[in-house]
Image: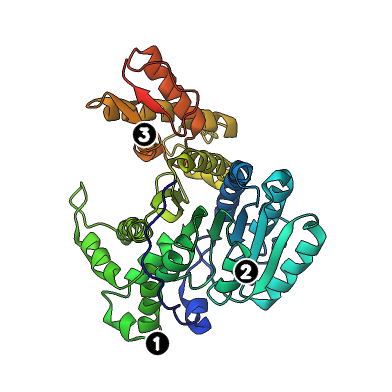
Amino acid sequence: MFVSQCPSLQKAAAKDDDAIGSELIVAPTDGAVMGNSREFFREKKPAAIFKHKLLEDYLTPWAAKLGSFNPQGVAFVDGYAGSGRYDGSEEGSPVIAMHAALKVPTSNLRCVFVEKLAANASRLSEVISTEGGGVDIVGPLHGTLEERMDTVLNAIDGRPALIFLDPFGTALSADLLVDKILCRPGRASTEVLLNFNIEAVWRFGGFLNSSRAMNGVNGKPTLETADRFLGGDWWHESFRTARKAMDDQGEYRSAAEAAMEVAARYAQMISSRAGVNALSVPVRRERTTQPFFSLMLFHTHDAAKLPFIDAAARAHRNWRHAHWERYADKHSDPMALFDLDVLPDRESEDNRLSSEAVPTIETNLRSLLSDRSSISLGEHMEAAFGRTLGTAGARELRKAVANLHSGGLIRKPPTRLDRAWLHKA
C-alpha cells in the first residue's frame, strides 16, 4: 500500500464567513447562488442527477470491496449533506449513502453527515429517523465541515473513508483538504470525491481584470474566497496567462478554458501536496460545450480508476435520459428539410456513443503501445479513454482490448482490466 508523506498539519483556517460564501459562488446546477440551498432542494437538477448517480454507482462497490478487507468497517463522509431528499422526493446524497450501507451490510459502512444550515439539518434528522434504520450513522452534525472536523475524524478513525465534498457556498480550503483529510493520521485509505465548480472559477476570474469589479463591495471578498479554496493566489496568473493564449483558430481562449486550466493545476497541486493521484471527469451541459464542473477523485490506488470511470459513464447516461428533451433539441439537425425528430431515441443514442467510443479507445491504446512492449492499464487509464472519459466505461474498454487481440496486436486479453497489463503479441 502506498503511504503518502504529508506535510505537517497546519492551523485550521478561519471559520466560513456566511456573508462571503452565501453571496458569491454560483451553483453549477441551476445558476442559483450556492448558499440558497432551499431553492436548490426543491427539485433535483440534471447536474445533481449526474453527481448522485456517479456517487451511488461508485460508493456501493467501493464499500463492498474495501469492507471485505477491513472487518472494522469503512466510512462515508458527506461534508455538505443538505436535507437528505429533494422536495420532489428524489434522493439526495445522504439517502444514497444509507441505501449503500443496507445493500452491503458486510461492509459495516458508517455514514457521517455534516450540514451547515439548521433547517436542512433538522429535515435530514427526520429523513434519517425514517430511512436510516439499521445503518451506523453519525449526525447530522450541525455546522460547517471545518467546524466539525475533529468530530468527523474521530468518527472515521482507523476506517478506510470516502469523503464527498459537494458544497454550497465556500468550499473547504486546500490546506484543510490536504492536511486534515487526505493526510489524516494512520494508514487507512482515504479517497475524496470533490465537485470542482469550473463555472464559479471563470466568474471569479472576471474580477481579476476589472477594476470596477475589484473596487466593488464583493471584489476583495470574492478573491479571498477563491484563494482560500484554491490554496493561494497562484491561480490569478494561471487564469490570466490562459486567457491570453491563442487557440488553434488564432483566437484568445475563453474564460471557461482558462478556468479548466486552473482546475487541472488545482488537481495537480492537491495530488502533489498529499502524495495521492487525481482523476477528473468533466461534466458538460451539452455535448459540445465547455465543462461547467469537474468531479475529481483523489485516490491512492490505480484500481480505483476504472470503477470511477465506469460509474461516470452510467451517470452520464442517466443525465442524458433525464435531460432528454433539451439534449435532443440541441442535437437536432438544423438543415433538415422537414420538421422531424432527426435525433434517434435514447437507446439509439446510447448505442451510438458507445460504438464511437470503442475505436477511439482502441486508437489510444495502439498509440500507447507503439513504443512499448507492454503497458499497465491502471497507470494509463485516462490516456486510454481520452476524450471519451465521462461517456465511456468498462464495456467500451473491454471491446477495444478485444479488438486489439483479434487484430493480433496483444496477447490474450486480461480477465480484470482495473489493474491489468497489456502485452504485445
> Which residue is drawn at the image coordinates 38% and 72% (left, top)?
226
Q: Which amino acid does label 2 sit on?
A: Val
**As rendered, which of 166 and 326 lies closer to the eye?**
166
Q: Are marks 1 and 2 in contact (CB under 8 Å)?
A: no
**As rendered, which of 228 and 139 lies closer to the eye?**
139
In front: mark 1 or mark 2?
2
- Count of numbered badges drawn on the protein: 3
Residue 384, disc: 3
Please tell me which of labels 1 and 2 falls first in the chain. 2
Q: What element carries label 3?
A: helix
* Quadrant of res 255: bottom left
Q: How crowded is mark 1: few (under 14 residues within 10 Å), some or many (20 or more)?
A: few
Q: Which amino acid does label 3 sit on?
A: Ala
> Which residue is drawn at the image coordinates 48% and 58% (left, top)?
194
Give the CA separation, mark 1 to mark 2: 30 Å
> Which residue is drawn at the image coordinates 49% and 28% (left, top)?
416
Q: What element carries label 2?
A: strand
Give the CA separation, mark 3 to mark 1: 47 Å
Residue 217, disc: 1
- Figure quadrant of the C terminus: top left
| Residue 325 in sight from this viewpoint | yes
Residue beneath label 2, please?
114
Image side of residue 345 versus residue 225, left or right:
right
